[in-house]
Amino acid sequence: MIEVLGVTKSFRGPGREVRAVDDASLHVGKGEFVLILGRSGSGKSTLLGLIAGLVRPTSGSVRIKGNDIGLLSDNSLAELRAREIGFVFQFSGLLPTLPALENVLVPTLLCRGGPGTRSRAREILARVGLTEREDAYPATLSSGEMKRVAIARALINGPSLLIADEPTGDLDVDTEYEIMDLFRQLNLEGMTIVMVTHNPDLACFATRLYVMDRGKLGLEPGPFPAKDREPGNAAAGAPDDE
Amino acid sequence: MSSRHEFHFPGLVFRNLVNRPYRTIVFVFSFALIAATLFSSQYLMSGARESLDEGVSRLGADILVVPEDYAAAGQSVMMTGEPNTFFFEDSGYRKISGLPGVARASPQIYIATLFASCCAAPVQMVAIDPETDFTVSVWLKENPGVTLGKNDIIIGSGVIQDTGRDLQFYGHTFHVVGQLARTGMGVDNSVFVRFEDAYVMAGESRQKAASALVIPRDRVSVVLVKTDPGRSAVSVADEIRRAVPGTRTIVREGLLDAVSGQLEALTRLLYGSTVAIAVVSVPLLGVISAMVTHERRREISLLRAIGAKKSFVARIVLAETLSLAVTGSLAGIGSAAVILAGFQDFIRISLEIPFTTPSAAAMIADGGIALLLPVAIGGISTLYPLLLVTRSEPYETIRRGEP
Ligand SMILES: Nc1ncnc2c1ncn2[C@@H]1O[C@H](COP(=O)(O)OP(=O)(O)OP(=O)(O)O)[C@@H](O)[C@H]1O
Ligand SMILES: [Mg+2]
């Protein structure tokens, strides 16, 4: 599904060069649930941008479904994103002039599949637990609610790949586990998921875990027995702050 | 039509317009102003041109022969019905009917009347020679059963009295037998009687009227001329001026020139304001577009990041501006049309031009032109936003939180 080979992304900072992603390689098979853990500034968001073709690598290559996305035209890349990838951005970003429900429907305008129906958007909003606020404008939503609208928007076109950058960052623990439960369900339905978090406790949901540290990506050795852990128990056993 | 249950592109555009009211209002207002001034200019030109064509062809004359010193006065009577009394110096005008190229010639006497109860403004009385007349007689032929007999009067559309009632001029009572259709020209403000009755009215005026009226025998005010088929009015007019000293001639082309001359000041003002408004609004709309687009960089980047092609974002920008341009223009054209229609008579009187409401076809053409300019200006104002779209760096813009 995803093949990242020796990708480096450096930014020209004041004075010296910043290597946000440093010679990272990553493999995600179809149907996997990959989690990337790392401290703030370690390059996680940049890596996700590279995977989705939103950031051009300084060196190395990214393949999605066998296509080297560095070779795709602007338009083909846009089409790939619209059709195959659902992206939940770290800073959710909704269109301020549209109510929640229509924000969810925007990606349906980008695919040849035709305009999506409101009833379908409503179903997805229900899955992220937001049935009441479908007519609310982003300015009146809490950040957690916005994030859930953004998740619903990422799912509306039924992508085969979901990329999520700290999708539960603004959520309380209960809602966080509801969302993680939804992700696990989507994963069981066949959706490939790559997710970034800095909450190590979510490692239990992953089929594969990477850790990022100052641009370097490392594979954490498995197994992850936590996959069968009950969300309720996990919430109860929330990690102590250290 | 978009179903209530689906979300379409126009829905997205509509939300963007409605939920950015500041830009929407400024744009719609500016476009309305531009379209309204442009439409008004076009409308006045069309109305004047049509009125003149209509009025001149109704008159049925190719040449109007007037006394040398009264060319301007004769023209005003014709065009706006501004009343005047004047006469040829002598009876040389009688030669006109015999000149080569002249098919018919008919003298008329112009008499300015005083304020009458019928009318808001003084009325021009035109006395015709029933023997030779070919203008009122055309109307009489179109209205079988009506004759212009002793003490009868036919009134222009602007004179308020019912057919069958009486009207008094210089103390003389006339019987209204008919009313002419509106032309927008001087005819509307005129009344038509026979020579004999005018002479009787003048004779009685010393006793009956507040001021006496003198109509010298054997003197007329103008001679209407119809040329032989195939003869050019201009060449026949030259002939008349040469053969009959002390005359001036007015031909249709000359009238058109005079009208456009009179309109020029106004249309220059209107076109000038259109240009001025356009010159001010292009940068204004450009700056607002740029500001809105700048403010929307995140939004544009977000759309691109979730898979919108540049062309899709460009379509949004264009659709929004064009919707505003079309809405604003239609509003501007509509209100201008309503105002112009309401002040129809005011326009005719204050501009001193022949004027009638333009035909539907002319109005559609005028409206089309008035729509085109705002659309073009709208197009120009999207250039910068479109440039931003093509240069957008989606992830760079949305990577961080709100600045
Ligand atoms: N466009 C850019 N220009 C300059 N530096 C950048 C740019 N994008 C990212 N960086 C730098 O690259 C590094 C990694 O950034 P990135 O946003 O990927 O981190 P992150 O792991 O997502 O952090 P966080 O958990 O806080 O979101 C940071 O030091 C950041 O300052
Ligand atoms: Mg990040």
Image: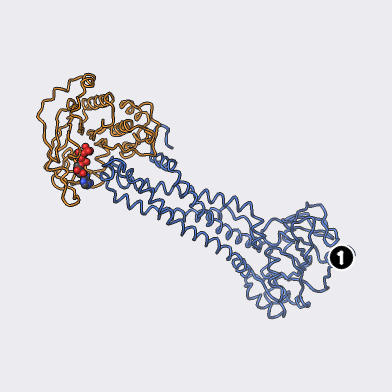
Chain colours: A orange, B blue
Residue drawn at (59%, 59%), measured in percent from left and top? Answer: B44
* Image x and y of residue A146, in percent: 33, 33
Amino acid at pointer 1? Ser
Instruction: Quadrant for residue A154, please give it.
Output: top left
Name the side, left or right, on which B167 lies relative to A68: right
Name the side, left or right, on which A161 lies relative to B5: left
Instruction: Tell me if residue A216 can be seen.
Output: yes
Q: Residue furthest left?
A: A221
Name the side, left or right, on which B18 lies relative to A190: right
Question: Badge 1: how crowded within 10 Å, few (<14), some, or many (20+)?
Answer: some
* Image x and y of residue B399, in percent: 26, 42
Vertical relation: B244 (above or below) A38: below
Q: Nearer the viewer, residue A215 or B305?
A: A215
* Image x and y of residue B20, in percent: 43, 43
Vertical relation: B18 (above or below) B55: above
* Image x and y of residue B343, in percent: 64, 54
Where is mark 1, residue-wise? Answer: B205
Instruction: Name the subunit of mark 1.
Output: B
Q: Secondary structure at mark 1?
A: helix
Q: Residue furthest right?
A: B207
